[in-house]
Image (spheres, rainbow, N blue to C red):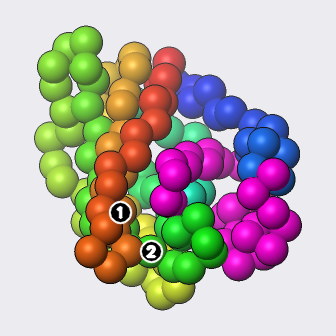
């Protein structure tokens, strides 16, 4: 099954208005030039799967870079995914492995069906926490 990845370059261009210093402090490219970027008023999160192609029923990891909008590293608290239309989620909770400086690896993820998955990413910096979401279509 194929994952339909959006273009990271387009998102980086959209974020250019946030300032080039921000991109330097919080790198959005996690290697290989592919992945996704989600952001809110307070956070920016870059992530990509490993392996690069997500297959139905096969375990994968997500590599994350989690930063505040002012370029400081933030904490990845939890990652989960569900299929809202089917009211079902993943059968196992991913393990979050910190790599330092706002970098994390969520291991043990499995999408057991094709379709629309909603990824929930819980992040924190100090006392401020937030949940960001991103849609992944698995075919």
Tell me which corner region of the image, top left, top right, bottom left or bottom right, holds residue 32.
bottom right
Q: Label 1's element?
A: strand
Would you name the residue on which mark 2 appears?
Answer: 74
Check the image and report above or below for 134 versus 85.
Answer: below
Residues under numbered marks 2 and 1 in contact, where contact means CB atoms less than 8 Å apart: yes
Q: Residue at x 61, y 72 (%)?
A: 70
Residue 38: give x, y in percent of width and height.
Answer: 55, 46
Between discs 2 and 1, the one toward the N terminus: 2
Comparing 135 with 33, the one in front is 135
Q: Residue at x 75, y 50 (%)?
A: 15
Q: Label 2's element?
A: loop
Residue 126: give x, y in percent of width and height.
Answer: 32, 79
Q: Residue at x 43, y 68 (%)?
A: 105
Residue 120: give x, y in percent of width and height.
Answer: 33, 44
Comparing 117 with 41, the one in front is 41
Q: Residue at x 27, y 23 (%)?
A: 83
Determine if the magenta segment contains residue 34.
yes
Left or right: residue 115 versus residue 18 is: left
Check the image and report above or below for 126 versus 132.
Answer: below
Q: Could you tell me if residue 51 is visible in this image?
A: no
Check the image and report above or below for 112 versus 16.
Answer: above
Would you name the residue on which mark 1 appears?
Answer: 123
Left or right: residue 21 versus residue 63 is: right
Residue 93: give x, y in percent of width and height.
Answer: 18, 54
Tell me the distance, in whole angstroms, between the alpha carbons under discs 2 and 1. Answer: 7 Å
Q: Which mark is residue 102?
A: none
Task: Give, as a single range, the part of the protein colored magenta.
Answer: 17-43
Q: Crowding near pointer 2: few (<14 within 10 Å), some, many (20+)? A: many
Check the image and report above or below for 16 versus 14.
Answer: below
Number of marks in the rendered image: 2
Tell me which corner region of the image, top left, top right, bottom left or bottom right, holds residue 13.
top right
């Amino acid at each position: 099954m194929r994952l339909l990845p959006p273009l990271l370059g387009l998102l980086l261009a959209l974020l250019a208005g946030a300032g080039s210093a921000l991109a330097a402090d919080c790198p959005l490219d996690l290697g290989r030039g592919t992945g996704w970027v989600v952001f809110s008023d307070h956070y920016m999160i870059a992530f990509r799967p490993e392996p690069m192609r997500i297959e139905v029923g096969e375990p994968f990891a997500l590599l994350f870079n989690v930063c505040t909008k002012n370029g400081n590293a933030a904490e990845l608290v939890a990652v989960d995914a569900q299929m809202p239309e089917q009211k079902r989620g993943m059968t196992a909770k991913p393990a979050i492995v910190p790599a330092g400086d706002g970098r994390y690896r969520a291991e043990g993820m499995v999408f057991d069906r094709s379709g629309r998955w909603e990824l929930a990413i819980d992040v924190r910096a100090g006392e401020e926490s937030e949940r960001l979401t991103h849609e992944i279509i698995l075919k």
